[in-house]
Image (spheres, grey):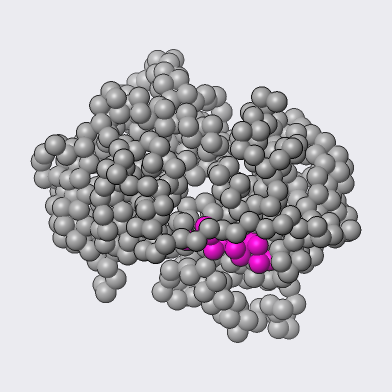
């Protein structure tokens, strides 16, 4: 018997149809995957189950009873919880305060008992937290873990996880699924929205495929291969991403003995030495929190460093971020909402963000409006960003479409060096391949690219060469081989 049954769900906004007669049946105790391209309707369907949206048509049945949730609060009271791609973490509050917020155990709280329960939940999932530190100290992976713990704090029995491993290392992702399986064995039900097909085939029992707002298929995972699942998602067979000879161009980025201080006064990057040649994509593999962010910020110009960092022979140490952008440094930021976009601004205005002082964007003392509109259209077209117009607020787009746009922006203005932090975060199969092809095209025109991803399989598939960072130390594996790289990532060798 299904613990969740969504039957004939339609969701319309004017002439736009987000969902068209979609049904979903989820069994108690299953890990059930919902997959599809960006804009397929996955998150919309989950928000209907979570009470954040009311369907235009159809029925929501939970525990065998039809429900008419008027808000997420009512769904939470029915023990449904959801972790979305955009975290609901308040930076100024402590981790413990964020965990309890909205679900405090009473008007008067015993904080010691609350912390003890928080530690029990964290231990259950294999997480560790400094509960008294402010949440602003968390990276995206830490924030994701805290969001998952909030579901357990609220005793959720039906857990909706939207791209839960997008910011986790392979080791953390594996540990998360071990914990989710344990929860499922104890009676919890997990609905997993993901683009990572290995997660589906390795951990889930059933999978539902959406495309263009319609139900394509629902299968037992044991009855479908990964290749078949990918074809169902995109609607066509996929060709292999061709490997190529390791580029032997001149050096674009030369880093020697680079030291970067962390927020706590420690050396977050320790005497890093490496090069990125023109024409090559270099992946930087590592568990989140091992110095990737600090290294990127140092190269971007938002954090100081000692040692040497040269771009095309020019010293970066005295250059501002503005000057580095003018020299061809392009950035796909780790946190697109905090570092790459102004949500209330239009796509056209976001198209010039960071480039507004470049001569090609200016006329007199102002911005060339015709150029701005033209660039926005180019960026939209490059990776097929789904939007209504260049005047649309970028904050109204899905996370995947925001990612497409900022990736296109980084690759659209003659890059010399692309610093890409999780460039395919939240992207579907076709879009991920398109972005990496865009990176490869930029490199074929003389750029170099340094790419951080917490998906090691992604780096292995798309990058020419891989470096590893662990504890702030950058090393190079003997060969591009998963086992050795995985061991270097956790300091096992």
Q: Is residue 299 toward the left or the right of residue 155 in the image? A: right
Question: Do we see residue 286 in this rendering?
Answer: no
Relative to 119, say whether 137 is above or below: below
Residue 327: give x, y in percent of width and height.
79, 65
Give the camera-side residue of 485 and 6: 485
Q: Quadrant of the C terminus?
A: top right
- Image quadrant where residue 78 sits: top left
Residue 10 visible in this rendered orientation of the protein: yes
Number of dots carrying numbers: 0
Q: Position of residue 314 (x, y in %)?
A: 88, 59
Q: Residue furthest left?
A: 65
Q: Which residues are magenta?
A: 430-442
- Give me the residue at 73% from left, 83% from top: 364
In this rendered view, identify the residue nearer to me: 482 or 92: 482
471 part of magenta stretch:
no
Q: Is residue 420 above or below residue 323?
A: above
Left or right, residue 222 beside residue 94:
left
């Amino acid at each position: 018997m299904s613990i969740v049954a969504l039957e004939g769900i339609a969701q319309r906004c004017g002439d736009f149809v987000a969902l068209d007669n979609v049904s979903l049946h989820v069994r108690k105790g299953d890990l059930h995957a919902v997959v599809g391209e960006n804009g397929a309707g996955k998150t919309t369907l989950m928000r209907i189950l979570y009470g954040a949206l009311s369907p235009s048509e159809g029925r929501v049945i939970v525990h065998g009873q039809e429900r008419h949730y008027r808000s997420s609060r009512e769904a939470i009271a029915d023990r449904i919880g959801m972790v979305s791609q955009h975290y609901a973490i308040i930076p100024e509050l402590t981790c413990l305060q964020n965990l309890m917020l909205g679900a405090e155990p009473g008007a008067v709280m015993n904080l010691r008992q609350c912390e003890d329960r928080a530690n029990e939940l964290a231990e259950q999932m294999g997480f560790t937290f400094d509960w008294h530190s402010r949440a602003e100290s968390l990276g995206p992976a830490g924030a994701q873990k805290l969001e998952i713990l909030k579901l357990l704090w609220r005793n959720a029995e039906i857990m909706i996880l939207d791209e839960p491993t997008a910011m986790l290392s392979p080791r953390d992702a594996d540990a998360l699924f071990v914990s989710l399986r344990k929860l499922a064995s104890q009676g919890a039900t997990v609905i997993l929205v993901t683009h990572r097909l290995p997660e589906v085939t390795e951990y889930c029992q059933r999978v539902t495929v959406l495309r263009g707002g319609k139900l394509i298929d629902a299968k037992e995972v044991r009855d479908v291969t990964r290749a078949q699942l990918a074809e169902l998602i995109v609607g066509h067979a996929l060709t292999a991403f061709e490997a190529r000879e390791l580029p032997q161009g001149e050096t674009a980025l030369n880093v020697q003995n680079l030291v970067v201080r962390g927020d706590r006064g420690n050396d977050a990057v320790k005497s890093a030495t490496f090069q990125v040649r023109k024409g090559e994509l270099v992946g930087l593999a590592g568990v989140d929190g091992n110095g990737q962010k600090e290294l990127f910020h140092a190269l971007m110009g938002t954090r100081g460093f000692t040692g040497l960092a040269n771009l095309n022979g020019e010293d970066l140490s005295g250059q501002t971020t503005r000057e580095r952008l003018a020299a061809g440094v392009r950035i796909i930021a780790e946190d697109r909402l905090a570092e790459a976009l102004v949500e209330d601004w239009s796509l056209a205005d976001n198209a010039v963000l960071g480039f507004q002082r470049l001569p090609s964007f200016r006329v007199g003392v102002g911005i060339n409006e015709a150029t701005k509109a033209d660039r926005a259209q180019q960026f939209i077209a490059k990776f097929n960003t789904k939007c209504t117009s260049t005047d649309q607020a970028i904050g109204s787009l899905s996370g995947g479409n925001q990612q497409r746009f900022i990736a296109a922006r980084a690759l659209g203005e003659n890059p010399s060096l692309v610093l890409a932090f999780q460039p395919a975060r939240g992207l579907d199969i076709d879009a991920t391949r398109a972005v990496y092809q865009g990176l490869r095209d930029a490199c074929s025109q003389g750029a170099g690219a340094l790419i951080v991803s917490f998906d090691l399989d992604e780096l292995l598939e798309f990058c020419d060469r891989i470096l590893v960072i662990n504890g702030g130390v950058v090393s190079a594996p003997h060969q591009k081989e998963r086992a050795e790289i995985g061991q270097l990532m956790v300091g096992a060798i």
